[in-house]
Amino acid sequence: MKIASWNVNSINIRMPILLDWLKAHKPHIVLLQEIKCETDKFPKEPIEELGYNLAIHGQKGFNGVAILSLFPIDDFITALPSSPLADHARYIEATISIPGSAIRVGSVYVPNGENLDSAKYQQKLQFFDALHAHCSELLQRDEHIVIGGDFNVAPEDIDTFNPDAAQGSVLFDMPSRKKFRSLLNLGMYNAFRLIHPTEHQFSWWDYRQGSWQRNLGMMIDHLLLSPSSADKLKSAEIHSKLRGLEKPSDHVPVVCELEL
DNA sequence: ATGTCACTCCTAGAGTGA
């Protein structure tokens, strides 16, 4: 069971790369962020032709999340309970039937925060609190759970190209890092770090300043696993090559494989 | 801080968000 998370930064612009990637890797479940289109304008047909079921929560112009699944999607919700940003499409969660079992998956797009003095930064921290409360609730049940997405935080020094240079960045500030840590402290596991505790890899490179060419990236996209999912974790990888294609997203897919 | 990209709207380029 291959599960991926990818901030595509516009589903419409990224369709050619997305379709090629789906055909090449055939992930069973894909968690998308920043689709940047309204729910009923999502380009469903080419993806459905590859066998995927869809759950979509979009809005005009920005944000937007979606779930693609080769297995049936039983039901889904399109908001965190008690979300502080009710008008932002930043969360979708589905229950998916798999042979002999089931899995719950969430696709999350945490607010960037803009800068440490911005009102949006406070909203980011509040969003983390709502996510924490929801994960705490979910973990009461003994389910296979994967919450993946763009968390807009590099949790540890190793997740930055240079921890000194990252100081002051809204992607590496200590309050955001502590919010992410508190998700782990609930009993969630960071899939990539379970498999690769010391690998220096990134999931995002800014479009500006030649960040990709200079490898000035950060690991801000993550797959969080419940204990029963973590017990089944077989592999985890970052598809960095996609950042070098024509018309790339500024993020690349983060993928894990569970033995379900 | 910003060398880019993708969105929006009084379709042309300024404003926004990242």
Image (cartoon, grey):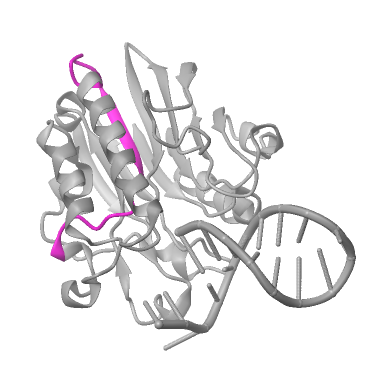
On screen, residue A142 versus residue A39, left or right, reads left
Q: Position of residue A150 (x, y in %)?
A: 37, 48
In the picture, the quarter occupied by the C terminus of chain A is top left
Q: Quadrant of residue A96?
A: top left
The one of A118 and A175 positioned closer to us in this rendering:
A118
Q: Residue at x 37, y 23 (%)?
A: A81
A79 is within the stretch colored magenta: no
Tell me: residue A80, above or below residue A163: above
Q: Position of residue A138 (x, y in %)?
A: 25, 20
Q: Residue at x 51, y 61 (%)?
A: A249
Q: Main secondary structure of the magenta part?
A: loop
Q: Which residues are the magenta region?
A: A138-157
Q: Position of residue A6 (x, y in %)?
A: 43, 48
In the picture, the quarter occupied by the N terminus of chain A is top left
Tell me: residue A20, above or below residue A226: below
Q: Residue furthest top?
A: A100
Q: Position of residue A98 (x, y in %)?
A: 38, 17
On screen, residue A105 versus residue A8, left or right, reads left
Tell me: residue A195, above or below residue A96: below
